[in-house]
């Protein structure tokens, strides 16, 4: 296993003030929503209600929730096939996400995309990409459009995995973003594995920040298991992108507690390694942090859990009772060479 560099960010991120309590409980709630949503998705997947691939985000919640706090409603988001967390944290409803995973017409991509292709233009959420590294050029294109249209305060946040840093698209995208001075915030979710391949088995250079620096892009390495560290670092980075109009890269060190996908037997890492990371569970650690400061009680937690359980029961009911797309619409939105000629 690759050695995990800890955050180089200053350790000032503690919630200690009463006025911060509301925000802290919001962060906790958002992480819990993602965790429980993923658990529910796994449950209905095993019932055959969701088909195809399903990649769970459990363990990485602090990244999506922390990063989202630094983005405005105008900013744009591009993510990967492990994007359920980002979509929920961006405010896309659990109903429409669950329905999308079922393939129902009420889903955020009208059931055409499924788990890996969430899309919601009203939230400026531009996917969901199943192709590793596929979102990076899209993010650069969106940022180029913003630059050309003088949308000076808008930035594009591009989430991608460590595996994407092995792709040509990664280098091409970083190069163009640096060369053309484009407002892209690159967010590398470094969970140490690309499917069953450990980072240090595939990369001569495992430090993603150095890869950014080689393109002249500023970067910062962050403890992705700490919601407060992620939130603070993303605020700094987003501010840097907004004020300079240039790209910035955050490398967020995180870990997925579940297998790569529901189809993966997870035989390439030890139980000991997983257990070691579970000690750093972003939700448990944050709960403890709040309890120690008298900002979270058992009753608070029970009330959060109960509201989330209610929301997710409703999402499953919504997906269960939503209609399928009518057969006559199946070829709608499908491009053909003939359609292109007309
Ligand atoms: C271009 C391309 N090559 C290979 C694959 C098969 N594949 C799917 S997920 C994955 C691993 C990607 O790992 P990473 O980018 O670290 O993201 P993570 O799954 O860890 O979140 C691979 C190789 C793919 N989808 N696209
Ligand atoms: Mg990975």
Image: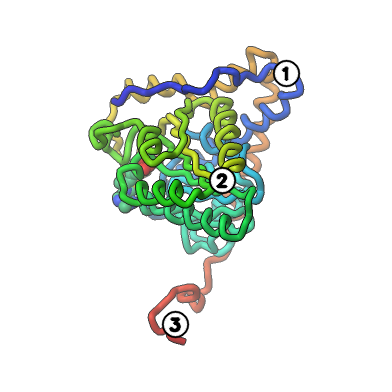
Q: Is mark 3 within 8 Å of ligand 1?
A: no
Task: From the image, tell me which residue sits under label 1.
Answer: 17
Task: From the image, tell me which residue sits under label 3.
Answer: 339
Within 10 angstroms of label 3, few (less than 14), some, or many (20 or more) residues?
few
Q: Which one is in front, 231 or 307?
A: 231
Left or right of 29 in this view: 5 = left
* Chain-order first, disc 2 or disc 3: 2
Mark-to-mark CA distance, 2 and 3: 39 Å
Identify the image quadrant of residue 237: top right
Q: Is residue 151 visible?
A: yes
Residue appearing at x 69%, y 14% in the figure: 294
Mark-to-mark CA distance, 3 and 1: 60 Å
Numbered circle sitting on residue 189: none
Residue appearing at x 43%, y 49% in the figure: 179
Q: Which one is in front, 11 or 315?
A: 11
Mark-to-mark CA distance, 2 and 1: 33 Å
Identify the image quadrant of residue 196: top left
Is disc 2 in contact with disc 3, using a CB cutoff of under 8 Å?
Answer: no
Local SS, label 3: helix
Looking at the image, residue 104 lies above or below residue 173: below
Within 10 angstroms of label 2, few (less than 14), some, or many (20 or more) residues?
many
Left or right of 31 in this view: 276 = left
Local SS, label 2: loop
Residue appearing at x 63%, y 51% in the figure: 152
* Chain-order first, disc 3 or disc 1: 1
Left or right of 273 in this view: 333 = right
Looking at the image, residue 338 lies above or below residue 270: below
Task: From the image, tell me which residue sits under label 2.
Answer: 245
Within 10 angstroms of label 1, few (less than 14), some, or many (20 or more) residues?
few
Is disc 3 in contact with disc 1, using a CB cutoff of under 8 Å?
Answer: no
């Amino acid at each position: 296993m690759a050695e995990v560099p800890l955050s180089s960010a200053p350790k000032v991120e503690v919630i200690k003030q009463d006025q911060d309590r509301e925000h802290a409980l919001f962060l906790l709630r958002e992480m819990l929503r993602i965790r429980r949503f993923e658990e529910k998705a796994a449950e209905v997947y095993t019932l055959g209600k969701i088909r195809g691939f399903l990649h769970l985000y459990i363990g990485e919640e602090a990244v999506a929730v922390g990063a989202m706090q630094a983005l405005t409603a105008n900013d744009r988001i591009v993510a990967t096939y492990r994007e359920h967390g980002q979509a929920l944290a961006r405010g896309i409803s659990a109903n429409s996400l669950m329905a999308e995973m079922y393939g129902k017409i009420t889903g955020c991509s009208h059931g055409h995309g499924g788990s890996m292709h969430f899309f919601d233009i009203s939230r400026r959420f531009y996917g969901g990409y199943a192709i590793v590294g596929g979102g990076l050029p899209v993010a650069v294109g969106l940022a180029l459009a913003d630059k050309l249209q003088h949308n000076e305060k808008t930035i594009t946040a591009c989430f991608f995995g460590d595996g994407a840093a092995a792709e040509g698209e990664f280098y091409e995208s970083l190069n163009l973003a640096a060369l053309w001075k484009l407002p892209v915030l690159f967010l590398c979710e470094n969970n140490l594995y690309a499917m069953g391949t450990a980072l240090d088995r595939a990369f001569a250079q495992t430090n993603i920040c150095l890869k950014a620096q080689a393109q002249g892009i500023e970067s910062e390495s962050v403890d992705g298991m700490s919601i407060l560290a992620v939130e603070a670092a993303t605020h700094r980075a987003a501010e840097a992108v907004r004020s300079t109009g240039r790209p910035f890269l955050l490398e967020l060190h995180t870990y997925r507690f579940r297998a790569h996908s529901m189809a993966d037997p997870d035989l390439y890492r030890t139980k000991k390694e997983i257990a070691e990371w579970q000690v750093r569970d972003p939700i448990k650690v944050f709960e403890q942090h709040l309890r120690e400061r008298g900002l979270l009680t058992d009753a608070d937690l029970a009330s959060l859990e109960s509201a989330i359980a209610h929301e997710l029961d409703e999402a499953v009911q919504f997906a269960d009772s939503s209609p399928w797309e009518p057969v006559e619409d199946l070829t709608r939105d499908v491009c053909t060479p003939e359609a292109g000629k007309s």
